[in-house]
Image (cartoon, rainbow, N blue to C red):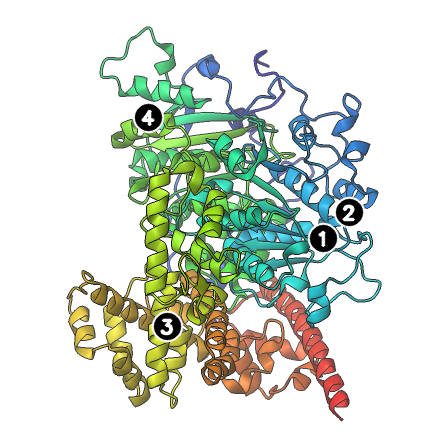
Amino acid sequence: MDPRQGIFHKTTLESTTTLQQKSFHTTTLAGHKRPLAEPGDSGQQQAAVPRRQNEFQRASAVGKELPRLTASTIAATGPDADTTAQPSEYSQRRVAQATPRSIVDRSLSLSFPRYGLPSSLVNNLNALGIKEIYPWQKQCLLGPGLLNGSKNLVYTAPTGGGKSLVADILMLKKVLEDGNAKALLVLPYVALVQEKVRWLRSVVQDIKRQNSQPDASEKRENSLWQRRAGDDTVRVVGFFGGGKVRATWADFDIGVCTFEKANTLINTAIDDCTITNLRAVVLDELHMVDDDHRGYLMELIATKLLSLGHDVQIIGMSATLQNIDLLSRWLDAHIYSTFYRPVPIEEYLVHESQIYPASSTSGLLKTATQLASTHPSASQPQNHPVRIVHPSPHKEFKDPVLNAVVALATETARSGYGALVFCNSHGCESDARLISRAMNDTSCLDPAIMEKRLDLLADLRSLSTGLDPCLAETVISGVAFHHAGLTTEERDLIASAYDSGVLKILVATCSLAAGINLPARRVILHNARMGRDLVGPSMLRQMRGRAGRKGKDEIGETYLCCRKDDLQAVIELMHADLPQISSGLTTDRHRIQRALLEVIAIKLANSRDTVEDYIQKTLLNLSTEPDVITAHVESSLQDLASMGFIRSDEPDLYDATQLGKAVVTSSLEPEDGAFVHREMQRALRAFVMDGEMHILYTFTPVHDTSVTVNWRVFRSEMEGLDDSGLRVMTFLGLKPTQVNKMAQGGNLKETTPEEKEIARVYRRFYLALQLRDLCNEMPIHIVSHKYDTPRGAVQNLAQTCQGFAAGMIKFCEQMGWGAMAAILDHFSDRLNAGAKSDLLALTKITFIKSRTARVFYENGLKTVAAVANADPKELVPILIQAQPSKVRLKSKDEEKYEEKLLAKAKIIADSANRLWQIEMQQQVYEE
């Protein structure tokens, strides 16, 4: 062992070398923990795997099988090649013990009295594997005023360093000490919300709260999770767009929310004066606060809480905070910062098939600078690569960057570890295909691993979208891809399989680095560009931070594969500091308008003085010149008045109009609210009632301006519209001649405000056509193919429009348009079900949606009672009939497939039984 390492571990290279030096009688492969061929083996077990694989290939044949490729070998350039590596900026504990030990410091135990945590919470965390905390977590928790909640906290720690546990402990302590306390945990992405809900529910399982009493809001409302007598458990509820359950403030003790849902919840709670029980708010990914697309909502949330002046602890955290002192002054918070990582990381730059050590940012910059030099000095040993990727004989791997990516990924899998490959969205599937072709022959794979991969394929095939052709090729080799084009169900299955080791290599877009917690032994960046642009310093650090998983890896490795032309840009990127955080309220999007409208509508400010007080508490006040702020406030108030959102009956006094309140209630941006109001006023004058297109158009979100219209598809769908649909186009101001012109290659002008608005209407109507097909039971994958749109985007539209529809109903109710609200509310059930009216009852059953509901209906199961009384075995043939692809399977594969469908059928029958019992109880009550 190198004495400088300070910790015993093997790198992936060393692991691979050890495996290759074993006897030729022993073959060890990815995911295999013992030799496949050992003395005494009969060979019968080995033969079983090729047979099952051949059955799978026959069952899912999608064309001629592509020939296998051989990944390039990677050779070390010398025995001392890696001695130039510098200590990693993430690896402060390289010389420390691998695990903190309570016998050294009792305060590392969660049961330490000063933390004041109930024994039930400590026991639950112990059962989940958290028996001790890290020294930095102890130091952070013991900061002044944090454990009693009198001081806010802003802290930063590397990805994988354990930062979430600190916020969890402080939040749970608040909730468990006060039986009526509520807490909000705010996260940027739906996947993170869902993951956190599952985690927190396991943490608080069977824990009783102290002195729990229903609050005022629970007494007034018939809430979904209204607390029963004697029920003092902790209710954890997720709030996100597309969620199936419409929970309210009274329904949770810990609410885990996206930015948008958290802002809406807080607005409602302030407006109806139920905010007083809020005791803690956790803002994760706080570096996104200057994002004027979504992250700015964190500034709105925190500033409103600061303006209230009541006892609520704000906890902000991120892995990438540069000017943390600014955020501390804004939130009046204690600061804590650490670079601690439980697993050390080794970092490398791959350039022109040569691998250079770059164990810190400065080390990588130094290496890259030497590479860029036209006359490198022979006296600079740092310029020597530690390893070289040999050229490939295959034409598919002529690109040195791709060749290096494949070689590094397959080397990791052969060692039995997992690898994450980050690339742009267009390259995910092609990279996954090529890597899978370069993986070892699966005929020699461990039967248990093969069994699990076949299970995964069966799970993917049983989804309503069917089995993706690319995944059908790659999964059997232990490779998959992960991007926004997949549906939520596909992404969840793939992420779970990778996390459990069934998949060894996952090719993903950079959004995975921030969107879900999936660490890897080795992280490989296929190019520093994701699309045309270089990744930013924050995203780069998040991707690199996925390397090394605690408890599974002794070390993490990151490889940045750099194109020759991008070397200078990579130098600048790696040299760049993390961006300075500032307010996102005064960018070109004018988010300050929404901030002012909300505080006036919820009566947090009603005069020029109270508006100034609110502005004084914003991050904007600390990051922008006063004169600039004043100008923005003045112009924003004037714009809000001109749009009819606020009025000033007396000088320097403000009040929200009915329209302004409707915009805030429906969670719209002021600009979107003005557009919706104009559209709804036009609809009130002439609403087409003899068809569904006008209602569907009304339910289509207005904020998705990035949609790409396939004008030929638009023209084809327009030509198929009936008289009702054509009247809708006429009332909206859409011209068939313009659509024909665009289909022939014309350009849609968007110069003037009028032109931009009509272009917005065209795009919205195009999305409404997709929504029409979904509501008429067309499967997602068919809609995706028809409109040349990724199926993940189609599913996202279906989920987003549900929340938008609820907002539109609130908008109409607030405006006093009761009849319009009733019409929209009546149709919203079809929107949620994705089916026609005759199937609405069936679609309430778990797993019975859209196409599946129609197949049940056509097979005579037309009611919930009929499904409840059916034998689950009788439902299996119906579920097979409902599958999008009629795949003929053989022997064990068929048995496995039917087993999964039988398990689904049992869940369906149980769900139908519960619904039927509720229906019977209602009938008895009515009688």
Residue 597's image quarter?
bottom left
Circles 2 and 1 in contact, beta carbons < 8 Å = yes
Q: What residue does disc 4 label?
A: 571
Residue 701's image quarter?
bottom left
Image coords of residue 169 (percent x, y): 70, 41
Camera-near label (4 vs 3) is 3
Separation of marks 4 and 3 at Cα, in angstroms: 50 Å
Identify the element where label 2 is drawn.
helix
Image coords of residue 376 (percent x, y): 27, 12
Q: Residues within 10 Å of mark 1 (few under 14, many from 20)?
A: many
Camera-near label (2 vs 4) is 2
Q: Nearer the viewer, residue 836 or 811?
A: 811
Circles 2 and 4 in contact, beta carbons < 8 Å = no
Q: What residue does disc 2 label?
A: 177
In which quadrant of the rendered image does the C terminus lie?
bottom right
Image coords of residue 528 (percent x, y): 35, 36
Q: Residues within 10 Å of mark 3 (few under 14, many from 20)?
A: some
Q: What residue does disc 1 label?
A: 181
Identify the element where label 4 is drawn.
helix
Separation of marks 2 and 4 at Cα, in angstroms: 51 Å
Mark 2 or mark 3, earlier in chain = 2
Inspect this view and state whether residue 535 appears: no
Three-letter residue code for mark 2: Glu
Q: Is residue 237 left or right of residue 736?
A: right
Residue at image coords 26%, 67%: 757
Circles 4 and 3 in contact, beta carbons < 8 Å = no
